[in-house]
Amino acid sequence: MGSVSSAQTGGISLSREGHSFWLLRSNPTDAKALMWAKLTYALLPQLIVITLGLLAGDLFGGVKFPLWLGFLLGFSTAATLASIQILLDVTYPDFGMKVEFGSSKNARGTGKLLSSMFLSMGVAAAWMFLWQLPDMLAEEGVLWGRPVQVWLTATKALTVAVGVVMLRIVNTVGVKRITRLLNDA
């Protein structure tokens, strides 16, 4: 959950361009490069938190799985969350928003920030639940006639597949939407 809340500025980074977005529109800006820059900005805080957590867990003996698997699942989950945030931002940009918590008279954009944050937390909680579901439903190590390890492997493969699909969607749908925003007069 810490990775979700630390990446909120990346998830609304296009809207935070604000009234300076005309600078991007007036220059020859490549939509794909802009999309990947915004996605990288949304991914980096999550990846730093995930990496530090995995390394600390490995250092103190709390991790019971290979580190490469933790990095792969962490990157896939972070890619899914960042993709959702970026797609939400390029679909419904708000260039007049100001991120000011606690402001009583002008808190424009706070609703978008909060909805993005709660959506990301919901997705992260759903993944955590999905990863634990086979162990919770299993009786004596068996779930629906198959060993629990088969179901755990399937949930991990699903996590990686969703991460790849979301990056692909961002690369197509998100780039098209940013192209429209850059070319809209």
Image: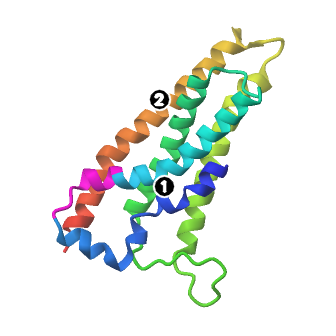
Residue found at x 77% / y 26%: 61
Q: Residue furthest left?
A: 28
SS under mark 2 = helix
| Residue type at the position of mark 1 | Gln
Question: Percent position (x, y) of residue 89?
Answer: 43, 61
Q: How many marks?
A: 2
Residue 71 located within the stretch drawn in magenta: no
For mark 1, what is the residue? 85
For mark 2, what is the residue? 161
Residue found at x 67% / y 30%: 131
Which of marks 2 and 1 precedes in the sequence? Answer: 1
Residue 35 located within the stretch drawn in magenta: yes
Query: Where is residue 117, by image quadrant?
Result: bottom right
Question: Percent position (x, y) of residue 112?
Answer: 53, 68
Question: In the displayed structure, would residue 97 be above or below residue 63?
Answer: below
Query: Where is residue 143, by image quadrant?
Result: top right
- The answer to whether residue 88 of the structure is visible from this angle is yes
Between 137 and 44, the residue placed more toward the observer is 44
| Residue type at the position of mark 2 | Ala
Which range of residues does the magenta coloring cover? 28-36
